[in-house]
Image (tube, rainbow, N blue to C red):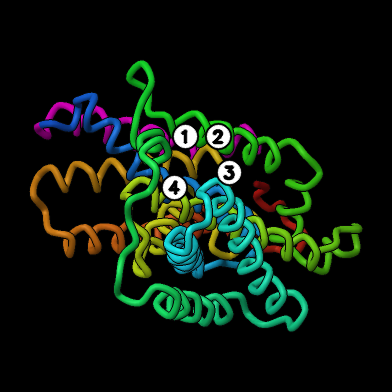
Amino acid sequence: MSARRLLGWDAAIIVVALLAVALSSVLVDGFGTTRNAGYLVLDLLPIALLALPMTFVVITGEIDLSVASTLGLTSAVLGALWDAGLPIETIMPLCVLLGALLGAVNGLFVTVFTLPSLAVTIGTMALFRGLAFVVLGDSAVADYPASFTGWVTGSSGGVPNVLLPLALLAIAFTVVLHATPVGRAVYAAGAGQEAARFSGVRVDRLKFWLYVTSGAVAGLAGVLWTLRYSSARADNGAGLELAVVAAVLLGGVSIFGGKGAMPGVLAGVLLLGTLQSALRLSDVTNEALTIVTGGLLVVSVLLPNLLRAATRRRAGPASARPGAPTTTP
């Protein structure tokens, strides 16, 4: 992650996110309370979790639109297994493993059969959601142990319990992306697959394990979602992929791959969650929230490209010359 990038889009989105928090605390009744801060963390939790591996996937030039359906299917399986009498301590790791297997299905189609990730994950998005309804139907399973549901929704010393594991995961993903050979391979694969292969990067293997990781984290998100609401339903997390992709792109990750940084993505998650929380407290309808999320998604795709085109225009024809310097992540 270059200093130039930290002073560019990432710095801008961090400042905008902090301004949104400050302005919402002043202008929106109830936003600045400790209680709402706890709700905000719980609302951000699944989006932030899914955005961490999604950042890696998008930087390699791919996408995973099945994450919300993976969350829904693992939630449904959790409910079915709990209803069958299995202990919750056994069910939770099984759900994470199931998520990893579902991610492996995506990775297999993308890397072995070389199918476009957009088409593959749109298909599995529908497939996994349909399987969730096969497992649980329209019913819901509740009555989970209070010690588990209470931990997810509770806090210690005013700090939500889920914030610590979320922060540890965010630090781990950030370190891997920006300070390890794996992270450098991710950027190399996104900047140019053939060049990356000539450099010794096993691109297909890298992408496969990124999809497995994305699925495993989605399985974990399904567990936490179920315990937060004390309800396993087949439609849990429906439509969440829109918010995840919007947060990642809003954070400065290029939809074309090769560029992006984790601090910007985390700021994008915070900005999106803040706007949604402020609008809910202002009695804005869910339909309007969807419009805002979709609008942010469009802006996050258009604005960086417009800025890049303006920069090239100012630089003149020399910038388009073969061999001219290019921007690094």
Query: SS class of the residue under badge 2?
Result: helix
Q: Amino acid at mark 3?
A: Ala
Residue at the extreme top: 157
Quadrant placement of the N terminus? top right
Return the mark for residue 224. 4
N-terminal of the pair, mark 2 or mark 3, is 2
Which residue is found at the position 25% from the left and 62% from the top?
290
Could you tell me if the residues under marks 2 and 1 are in contact, i.e. CB atoms within 8 Å? yes
Question: Going from the N terminus, do you reach mark 4 or mark 1 first?
Answer: 1
Q: Answer with mark 4 or mark 3, whichever residue precedes in sequence.
A: 4
For label 1, the residue is: 11
The amino acid beneath tag 2 is: Leu
User: Residue 261, labelled with which disc?
Assistant: 3
Residue 7 image point, x, y percent: 52, 33
The residues colored magenta run 1-29
Disc 2 and disc 3 in contact, CB within 8 angstroms: yes
For image coordinates 55% across by 57% down, the residue present is 254
Which structural element holds mark 4?
helix
